[in-house]
Amino acid sequence: MVRNLLGSVLALAGATAAVWSPFRAWYDGRHGRHYRLGDLFSGGGVTNVPAELFASLFLPFVGAALITLAGLLLRSRLLVALAGVIVLGFTVVWLVRVGQAEGSLVISGTPTDGLGPGTGLAFGGGLVLLLASVVLRGRVRGERAEPVYVPPPDPAVPTLDGAGG
């Protein structure tokens, strides 16, 4: 029970960090909600064209949060791990595509230069989701209650069907 509680808290924290990350600066002060989801998979790469909220990085992270909630309700470690892989996958694809577009990635101490806190939140949220899937106990298959011992009927005691004694 304690493992499930701790795993649930970790999973909710990871999902919250992932959903919050697009509202923080990802690179050079540009928020994650301004990166178009289609740019990650197009030949042109990441562009400066702004995105609508549900056409940005926000969409896969909200999807991962919903998968996390389903995993917690169903006590499925696999679903929580899948949510972590989705968050990490989109973060890594974004890092690769921005690195290609910029020529290199810069890590700086200020949110307006280089990688920002949104990238860290997304990456950390994905790792926390994976950690939560390890901590969760999940469902235990094949676990059954101890069989109840029922003594054999005593032949000296009469039964309702008339047999015995």
Image (cartoon, rainbow, N blue to C red):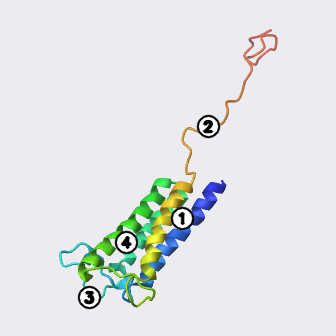
Q: Which mark is residue 91?
A: 4
Q: Residues under labels 1 and 3: Cα distance?
A: 33 Å
Q: Is residue 75 visible?
A: no
| Three-letter code for the amino acid on which mark 1 is drawn | Ala
Q: Residues under labels 1 and 2: Cα distance?
A: 28 Å
Q: Nearer the viewer, mark 1 or mark 4?
A: 4
Pick whichever of labels 4 and 2 is earlier in the sequence. 4
Task: Please tell me which residue lies in front, 100 or 51.
Answer: 100
Name the residue beneath numbered marker 3: 49
Pick whichever of labels 1 and 4 is earlier in the sequence. 1
Q: Position of residue 99 (x, y in %)?
A: 28, 77
| Three-letter code for the amino acid on which mark 4 is drawn | Thr
Q: Residues under labels 2 and 3: Cα distance?
A: 57 Å
Q: Residues under labels 4 and 2: Cα distance?
A: 42 Å
Q: Residues under labels 1 and 4: Cα distance?
A: 18 Å
User: Crowdedness of circle 1 by 10 Å Cα count: few (<14), some, many (20+)?
Assistant: many
Does residue 138 appear to the left or right of 96 in the view shown?
A: right
Task: Please tell me which residue lies in front, 48 or 103.
Answer: 103
Q: Position of residue 129 (x, y in %)?
A: 49, 64
* Element on which disc 4 rests: helix
Q: Nearer the viewer, mark 1 or mark 2?
A: 1
Q: Position of residue 164 (x, y in %)?
A: 77, 10
Does residue 96 appear to the left or right of 139 in the view shown?
A: left
Q: Nearer the viewer, mark 2 or mark 3?
A: 3
Figure quadrant of the C terminus:
top right
Q: Is residue 18 visible?
A: yes
Question: For residue 24, what is the image quadrant?
Answer: bottom left
Identify which residue is drawn at 72% across, 24% down.
Answer: 150
